[in-house]
Image (spheres, rainbow, N blue to C red):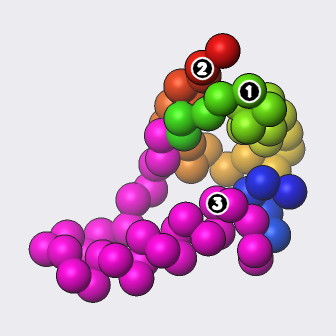
Amino acid sequence: MLFKRANSVFSKALNQWSQNRKNSASKKVPNKFVIIAEGVAGLAAREYIQSKEYQGEIDNVLFFE
């Protein structure tokens, strides 16, 4: 799945963000995310948001095409 597996796109992005945050002034982990999606990625994001597994961690989704 796009969001739930350890090697998912969401998990990879969160891990990369947490590694990069060590170099930034902010030490807070975001509790909401904005997704910018095109095509099938937008459909996957929408499917996740409408699923029972959704936990409210997405603030907004921007769809293109």
Secondary structure of residue under mark 1: loop
Secondary structure of residue under mark 3: helix
Which percent across, then down, holds residue 17? Answer: 42, 70
- In which quadrant is the C terminus drawn? top right
Which percent across, then down, holds residue 11? Answer: 64, 69
Residue corresponding to mark 1: 39
Residue sitting at x 80%, y 32% = 40
Q: Is residue 49 visible?
A: no
Q: Amino acid at mark 2?
A: Phe
50 relative to 56 in the view: left or right: right
Which percent across, then down, holds residue 51? Answer: 84, 39
Give the Cα separation between the discs numbered 1 and 2.
Answer: 7 Å
Q: Is residue 41 visible?
A: yes
In the picture, the disc for residue 10 is 3
58 relative to 43 in the view: left or right: left
Task: Tell me which segment is drawn in magenta.
Answer: 6-34
Q: Are marks 3 and 2 in contact (CB under 8 Å)?
A: no
Residue corresponding to mark 2: 64
Give the Cα separation between the discs numbered 3 and 2.
Answer: 19 Å
Of the image marks 1 and 2, the number of the one nearer the N terminus:
1
Mark 1 vs mark 3: in front:
1
Mark 3 vs mark 2: in front:
2
Residue sitting at x 30%, y 70% = 28
Q: Label 2: how many residues lie within 10 Å, few (<14), some (14-19) or many (20+)?
A: few
